[in-house]
Image (spheres, helix red, strand yellow):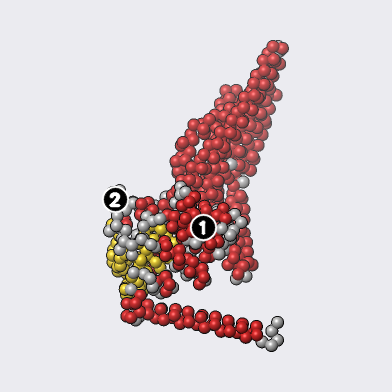
Amino acid sequence: MKFLRQLSRFTRPERGMLIGTVAAGLLFTGSGLVPPLFVRQILIWHAEGTTTENAMLIVVAALVGAYLVRAAARYTYGLLSHWAAYNVQQAMMVSLYRHIQTLPHRFFTDRRVGSLVSRSVGDVETVEDFVAHGIPETVIATALPAAMLIALFIINWQLALLALLPIPIILVAGRFLFPHIRSSWRVVRESVAKVTATVTEGIAGYAVIKAFGREREQLRIVQRNWQRYRDDIQKAQFFSLVPAGMIELLAGLGLILVVAVGGDLTLRGIVPVADLFVFVVYLGLIYQPVIQLAAISENIQKAMASTERVFELLDIQTDLRDKPNATAPSAPEWSVEFDRVDFRYEPEEPVLQGVSFNAEPGELIALVGPTGVGKSTCAHLVPRFYDVDSGAVRVAGIDVRDLPMAWLRSNISLVLQDVFLFAGTIRDNIAFGRPGATEEEILEAARAANVDEFAERLPNGYDSRIGERGVRLSGGQQQRISIARAVLKDAPILILDEATSAVDAETEALIQEALDRLTLRRTTLVIAHRLATVRRADRIIVLRGGGVAAAGSHDELVAHGGWYADMVRRQQLSARWRLESTDQEREASVLASTAPNAR
């Protein structure tokens, strides 16, 4: 089966433990077959009149030994099966997460986080359950009935054939039902992924949902997805429980046939009572593993559906790989160059067309232009989050496609508008920039980014926990931690993408002060609209219509006119209006405080 071949990639290292699990399981179940055989022997001795006290003591001692073995085998079976399953689960989760890390940015723009979490955790847990129970129980359910049938054929082959009459019906029914069961459980796993994605988004976006008063609508979406999941799992259960009920019925039919025919033969003295006793007991046991196999068919079908989903993700190949001969330069000059770059996210929607500009070592280059013109795309092309369609992006004079990605990204620091912080402490998030940094280096980076301005006022200082995505901090505080992380990384190339766009003037001043320190002696690409950030650039690149519309210093572009000069004029008018509004508010406040009826 393809499913088992895929799974063997993770179960192969645990095959010794799995073999031990199956052996212990067979020993546990097989030891349960011993007592009926001893009772048969006692009945034979009784019929022959040859029973002795010593013989009975031997039987009792053998039974004690059988049950001691049974107890030890049961414990060993449970222990080894779960140890092997948890090892497989860990290996699969780590492998899946490692693979996800290699996938390009383009992959994540088309997937919901909750869906990926469902595959990485939920589907893998389903596979773990199958490894712990499905694999050993399937082997036992196959081997044990075979052993009992051999014993029954040795005792009386005619009655054994009679007992096997229901088996072909079971096999035909299983061949018809199992494909339906597997497909229905695949639908269930997809429904689970949709529910997980919806709930994850609802929790992550709780502030937006509350701000727009959309709790009821969001609840309806979650309810609708849960109802779809409920309907799918009920349908899957409808198919999954059929085999167990069918086997119970057919097992009863086999037993009835043996009792009817065997009982008649016993009454006529053709078949000994002892043999009929063993047949009745064994037929009660022989179908139990098969019934159990039908019961765990749900587990098997779930595991098959989950394994398919996991390997669908593992089979996705990234188009961003290091070339076999990719080598890092020994003494790089930290320049950045765009050479006639074309890029598009969708085939029919070009984003960049023939974009060319360069940043010499130590220069600060600003990229400006209307929203959606491709400024952030340029920022993502430098660390090779995407590959260009044509042209080249070069770092240190080398096409980034010819450089090792790990080396390239280790020499680039990113400070983005959408700051992501981990749910740890302030210290943890700064130290993420360079694992192994000393305490003094972390504090120095914090001071350079003006993090100390608020961190030292918190009850636990730098050990204060900031919540998931830094929810306990303001946007400006989050941004300064992001800058401190970049300061600590100390990479020679820096990319700033709208790092001050969503903060007030006072916070912007603190962030701008931190950025001035950060950009010192670094090759910097900055994407911004605010004049405070842009005007100090060595050169400003104006992007419009997917290409470079103008380039030059702040003064040159203002003198030249065009889009940049209009942007400067609009910002100056806006700043003047805010200043006049502030003056009017201040004057009104003074007049109110000096009025005759003022208190």
Which picture quadrant has residue 527? bottom left
Rendered view: 209 above or below 151: below
Considering depth in this image, is 77 or 277 the residue closer to the camera? 77
Percent across and percent down for residue 76 are 59, 30
Query: Residue 489's mark?
Result: none
Q: CA distance from mark 1 to mark 2?
A: 33 Å
Q: In the rendered image, is residue 320 in sight?
A: no
Tell which residue pokes out farthest to the bottom in this image.
596
Query: Residue 330's mark?
Result: 2
Q: Report the residue at 63% width, 43% height from top.
A: 245
Percent across and percent down for residue 100 are 45, 52
Q: Nearer the viewer, mark 1 or mark 2?
A: 2
Considering depth in this image, is 497 or 123 the residue closer to the camera? 497
SS at mark 2 in the image: loop
SS at mark 1 in the image: loop
Q: Report the residue at 33% width, 73% height from top.
A: 553
Q: Give amino acid for label 1.
A: Leu
Q: Is residue 547 left or right of residue 583?
A: left
Q: Report the residue at 58% width, 84% height from top.
A: 587
Query: Residue 421's mark?
Result: 1
Percent across and percent down for residue 405 are 36, 53
Q: In the rendered image, is residue 398 in sight?
A: yes
Q: Are marks 1 and 2 in contact (CB under 8 Å)?
A: no
Rendered view: 587 above or below 110: below
Query: Label 2: how many residues lie within 10 Å, few (<14), some (14-19) or many (20+)?
Result: few
